[in-house]
Amino acid sequence: MSIFTEQQDVTPATAWDTQSMVEVLEGRHGTHAASVADFFASYHGISGRRDRARSWSNVATLVRRREHQRLSA
């Protein structure tokens, strides 16, 4: 049984929200930022909060993309 209600988030994360979360995670967690975002995506997915899980998955993807770009340059 989930401690959360079944109500989904009303407003999905915008591109600005996602970019902000990426920058904060990279600043606080460095090379572990994608893993932290994956953890939150899993947590919210298990809790039944699909919108938040999807947002955190997008954050993890963007962190990995930025890391790949930095290493390729």
Image: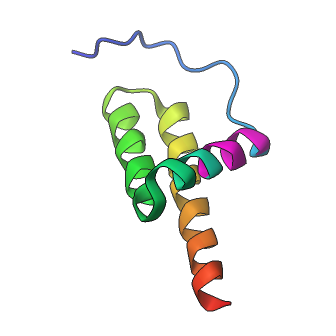
Viewport quadrant of the N terminus: top left
Compare residues 68 and 45 and report the one nearer the observer: 68
Q: Is residue 71 left or right of residue 6?
A: right
Q: Name the residue located 38 percent from the left edge and 56 percent from the top edge.
A: 35
Viewport quadrant of the C terminus: bottom right
Task: Check the image and report above or below for 26 versus 69.
Answer: above
Q: Position of residue 42 (x, y in %)?
A: 35, 42
Q: Which residues are magenta?
A: 16-22
Task: Check the image and report above or below for 34 versus 66.
Answer: above
Q: Name the residue located 48 percent from the left edge and 33 percent from the top edge.
A: 50
Question: Is residue 14 inside the magenta stretch?
Answer: no
Q: Name the residue located 67 percent from the left edge and 45 percent from the top edge.
A: 18
Question: Is residue 21 inside the magenta stretch?
Answer: yes
Compare residues 73 and 1 and report the one nearer the observer: 73
Compare residues 44 and 34 and report the one nearer the observer: 34
Q: Is residue 23 left or right of residue 44?
A: right
Q: Position of residue 53 (x, y in %)?
A: 47, 39
Q: Position of residue 45 (x, y in %)?
A: 38, 36
Q: Is residue 35 left or right of residue 16?
A: left
Q: Name the residue located 68 percent from the left edge and 35 percent from the top edge.
A: 13
Q: Position of residue 2 (x, y in %)?
A: 27, 16
Q: Is residue 20 left or right of residue 56?
A: right
Q: What secondary structure characterizes most of the magenta part? A: helix
